[in-house]
Image (tube, helix red, strand yellow):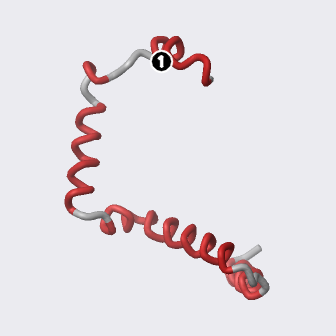
């Protein structure tokens, strides 16, 4: 299926949905996907959120913040 055909089919599908909840779910999904392409998601975050994510990235790269995989399996084995 090529892009124009895919777009047409997608529009047709949306046109036949009368359930507002389903339409809102489609809309939110498409907005999230659109914002995540080419770094747009990063630009949509507040400065505070960006700084928090960068700090989290730094912290997860520190060996003393890491938990051994085997230890995690022992601790949470009943949910695995």
Label 1: state its secondary structure: helix
Front-most of 77 and 44? 77
Question: Which image quadrant is residue 77 in?
Answer: top right
Q: Position of residue 14 (x, y in %)?
A: 71, 82
Q: Is residue 75 left or right of residue 64?
A: right
Provide the residue designation for mark 1.
72
The image quadrant where one finds the C terminus is top right
Q: Position of residue 29 (x, y in %)?
A: 57, 67
Taking the spot 20% from the left edge, 61% from the top edge, the residue there is 47
Question: Which image quadrant is residue 24 in?
Answer: bottom right
**Mark 1 surroundings: few (<14), some (14-19) or many (≥20) residues within 10 A:** few
Taking the spot 28% from the left edge, 30% from the top edge, the residue there is 61
Q: Is residue 12 left or right of residue 57?
A: right
Question: Which image quadrant is residue 49 in?
Answer: bottom left
Front-most of 49 and 9? 49
Q: Position of residue 3 (x, y in %)?
A: 67, 78
The image quadrant where one finds the N terminus is bottom right
Q: Position of residue 23 (x, y in %)?
A: 65, 77
Taking the spot 74% from the left edge, 88% from the top edge, the residue there is 15
Q: Please determine whether, in this image, residue 74 is positioned above or below residue 23.
A: above
Front-most of 58 and 26? 26
């Amino acid at each position: 299926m090529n892009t124009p055909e895919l777009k047409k089919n997608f529009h047709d599908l949306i046109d036949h949905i009368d359930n507002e909840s389903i339409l809102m779910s489609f809309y939110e999904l498409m907005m999230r996907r659109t914002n995540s392409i080419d770094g747009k998601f990063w630009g949509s975050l507040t400065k505070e959120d960006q700084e928090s994510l960068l700090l989290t990235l730094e912290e997860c790269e520190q060996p003393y913040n890491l938990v051994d995989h085997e230890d995690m399996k022992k601790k949470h084995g009943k949910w695995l």
